[in-house]
Image: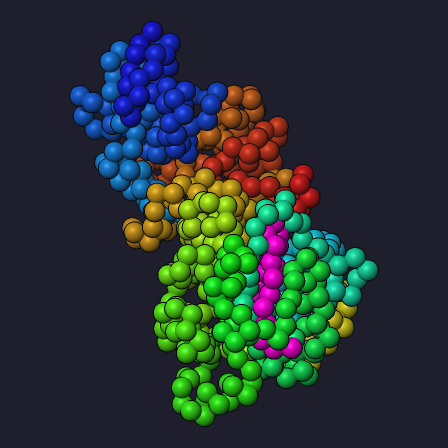
Amino acid sequence: MPRLTIDNRSIDVPPGTTVLEAARRLGIDIPTLCHLDGLQPHTSCFMCVVEIEGQAGLKPSCAMPVAEGMVVRTQSDVVMRARRTALELLLSDHPGDCVAPCSLACPAHLKVADFVAAIVAGDNRRAAGIVRRRLPLPASLGRVCPRFCERACRRKELDEAVNIRDLHRWVADKDLASSDPHRPDGATESGKSVAVVGAGPAGLSAAYYLRQMGHACTLYEAQPQAGGLYRCGIDARRLPRDVLDAEIAAILGLGVQLRSGVRLGRDVSLDDLLARHNAVVLAIGTQTAMDQAAFYAEGRLAGGEVRYDFSLLNALGLQPSRRGVQADRATLATGRAGVFAAGNVVTGPNYGVHAVASGRRAAVAVDQFLRGADVVGDPAHVNVLMRDLSGDEVAVLRAHADPSPRGMPDSGNPAAAATASDTEVRAEAGRCLDCDCGKRDTCALRQLAARYGASPTRYHGPRRPFERDATHPDIVFESGKCIQCGRCVRIAEQDRETLGLTFIGRGFSVRTAAPFSSELSEALRRTARRCVEHCPTGALSLKRALRDSGG
């Protein structure tokens, strides 16, 4: 059997084995996009390239047979650069939004298209679960959030943005009023505990996620009640206290302990907290309304900044900055081991969604710290975002959406959303253009782009138009997202589809399509779902109703 060396590790393999197969036997990961076991190699994606000693250029490992004495390098600088370049070229001509603009604009990255689709389907409980994955205080935020999402909504290009804020307020209100409100699943108890100093939106959010991660959590709050600026800085007519209290109670109901009337630096020290707990999250950004007024009067604040007690921070041995505790931007870790800072961003009563997002980020970093993993924060994502859509492209997005104008009441009355009828709410949700990619979370192109640090804006040029073919009963084909990997073409051929798919055109204009201008439903009669399963991008995806039902 031929013996070769891959990344300084030797292996004997049968003749005819490819370099890719040999590497896998050694547990060496070589990325692929066009390769699929059981199909003939296509060698189009350039992701599986490797260096072979004594041979010029890079070679596709999926089609390169091994040879006696071969020496292979799979992760050299030139290989890594080539893979990154291949990804950046694919991303440069990839018309489609990885994540809907509304979700990207939301600091908490609420999955808007998912929860509004659940409303349209009449599944309000599922909608509540989706909302609460990213918004621990959705009913409160639904009354005070400044609608970052709606500013980015593509529906504005037709008439008016979808009333996203009031939709998630309606979902949250209905859930709170139900006999069985949504309760997130929790992980196995870790045996670790965390002190969260400050029970405002950031601290409540951190505690909410830490409990779901299995960590015991105690909130230390200087005021008599939790809520922070939401309680002391927002008029009760705008944010009714019974709504705020109900959402706080739901968080405490997860097993979070609250110790109110305890001020850090007066009643307890940072050293005390570190002795009692395995980690500390500082979420002490806002002071009382009286303190806030005094700070403004003294000219120590610009409008909207977080208000930290800098003398307290100095006493704690933490370096303060103009925006609060000096912390790593990605992980919110401070210079002191086990101490993290949430909420230290420019914010104010209307910007609690930033604090909520910060609390979640802190919880993710603390969880990594407690589990002994590298503290890196949320994993990086690469997002392609379409810009300057043509009228025809907007029409493609509009094709499946309710053409009605914005109809759900947009009122400053905090009770308005809760009293909207189910019919009004479902009609408003139906106006969503569903900009999200059908494979947002599973796209191999997006995952590899993050892994290799590929930039979607490195190369520029005229992009293909955004197209969406929804004529098949089960699947959607967005040809602009196709990277011509040939998987679907080869699958249809292998399974003896009468028509199948084929490549049309040559060079840069080549595209994958049904032959003879046939309908997609004719081309893929038996293999549609298998093609979707193995499509490495969002070019082929299940229709939303089937995705949401698991079917």
Front one among 292 and 42 = 292
**From what the image shows, is residue 169 above or below residue 299?**
above
Q: Quadrant of the C terminus?
A: top right
Left/right of residue 298 with respect to residue 217 in the rendered view: left
**From what the image shows, is residue 409 above or below residue 137?**
below
Q: Residue at x 45, y 78 (%)?
A: 309
Based on the picture, tell me whether residue 546 belongs to the magenta stretch.
Answer: no
Front one among 435 and 205 = 205
Based on the picture, tell me whether residue 209 belongs to the magenta stretch.
Answer: yes
Q: Position of residue 318 (x, y in %)?
A: 39, 68
Q: Position of residue 391 (x, y in %)?
A: 48, 61
Q: How is the image coloured?
A: rainbow
Q: Position of residue 534 (x, y in %)?
A: 51, 32
Quadrant of the rendered structure where residue 179 is?
bottom right
Left/right of residue 84 with respect to residue 419 in the rendered view: left
Left/right of residue 444 with respect to residue 434 in the rendered view: left
Q: Is residue 96 visible?
A: no
Residue situated furthest bottom in the rendering: 297
Q: Which residues are magenta?
A: 201-224
